[in-house]
Image (cartoon, rainbow, N blue to C red):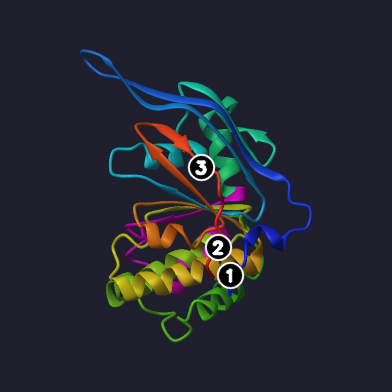
């Protein structure tokens, strides 16, 4: 059954607003423009895919949206905060409170078990019942029997499931995913994308991912294309494939 994730919230508010975003990098002989005049609005609960070829600027855009870097020009408002006007420490605090991440390379801590990796952000945020919450999430992603395994003892798909559980642990307002299935085979990648879509619906967490995979992108409620640093959205929006 096809269902748009936008329908899960009757009165959604804009959680991410980008205006005239430009990003340039100074090189020895010239200036490279990576992003040009990007405008974007994303509502709470949306699932959004940004599709583009390597070098198109999509990963740079994701880093700016998440407050990992600052733009050369323009503004980014994340959940009511103008992050483009914040200092590095303020952006880090905002990310800790409202943002989750899923990376292509998993980025789990190798010395910690699956349970400890998911508990870590909860403990850093001084959340109560961190272990119970981590166990619940790992059970939800199908790893209830793998709590004590370290990343080296898990397959790539299992590591990404741990990373997803960790990303959702603190109930972020928005989750950014950078090629979340890029290091996985087709079947495992589909399982991981199924999980991301399910948690997007269940928790109402806004999902913004960059990918070169058109099949993954079409599962999102909105799809944007980026080429040469210019972002565009097709006039006809497709319903998310769940």
Q: Secondary structure at mark 1?
A: loop
Q: Which residue is mark 3?
A: 233
Q: Are marks 1 and 2 in contact (CB under 8 Å)?
A: yes
Q: Quadrant of residue 60?
A: top left
Rendered location of residue 101, percent (x, y) = 48, 54
Residue 44 included in the magenta stretch of the image = no
* Figure quadrant of the C terminus: bottom right
Q: Which residue is mark 1?
A: 2
In the rendered view, would you say 83 is above or below 207?
above
Estimate the spatial distance between the alpha carbons at disc 3 and disc 2, rounded to whole Å.
15 Å
Q: Nearer the viewer, residue 85 or 27?
A: 27
Where 101 falls versus 3 (above or below)? above
Question: Which residue position is annotated with label 2?
Answer: 240
Indicate whether residue 105 is drawn in magenta.
yes
Instruction: Give the CA separation, mark 3 to mark 1.
Output: 20 Å
Q: Residue furthest bottom?
A: 145
Image quarter of residue 128:
bottom right
What secondary structure is found at the residue carrying circle 3?
A: loop
Q: Residues within 10 Å of mark 3 (few under 14, many from 20)?
A: few
């Amino acid at each position: 059954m096809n269902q748009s994730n936008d329908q899960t919230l009757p009165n959604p508010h804009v959680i991410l607003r980008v205006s005239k975003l430009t990003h340039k990098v100074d090189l020895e002989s010239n200036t490279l423009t990576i992003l040009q005049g990007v405008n974007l609005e994303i509502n709470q609960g949306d699932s959004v895919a940004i599709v583009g070829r390597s070098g198109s600027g999509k990963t740079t855009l994701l880093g700016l949206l998440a407050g990992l870097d600052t733009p050369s020009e323009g503004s980014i408002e994340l959940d009511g905060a103008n992050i483009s006007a914040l200092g590095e420490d303020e952006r880090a605090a905002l990310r800790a409170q409202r943002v989750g991440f899923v990376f292509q390379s998993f980025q789990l801590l190798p010395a910690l078990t699956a349970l400890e990796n998911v508990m870590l952000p909860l403990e850093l945020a001084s959340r109560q019942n961190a272990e119970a919450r981590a166990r619940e999430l790992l059970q939800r992603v199908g790893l209830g029997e793998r709590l004590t395994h370290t990343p080296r003892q898990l397959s790539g798909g299992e590591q990404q499931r741990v990373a997803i559980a960790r990303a959702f642990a603190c109930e972020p307002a928005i989750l950014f995913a950078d090629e979340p299935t890029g290091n996985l085979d087709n079947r495992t990648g589909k399982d991981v994308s199924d999980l991301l879509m399910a948690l997007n619906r269940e928790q109402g967490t806004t999902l913004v991912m960059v990918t070169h995979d058109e099949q993954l992108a079409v599962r999102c409620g909105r799809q944007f294309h980026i080429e040469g640093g210019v972002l565009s959205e097709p006039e006809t929006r497709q319903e998310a494939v769940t």
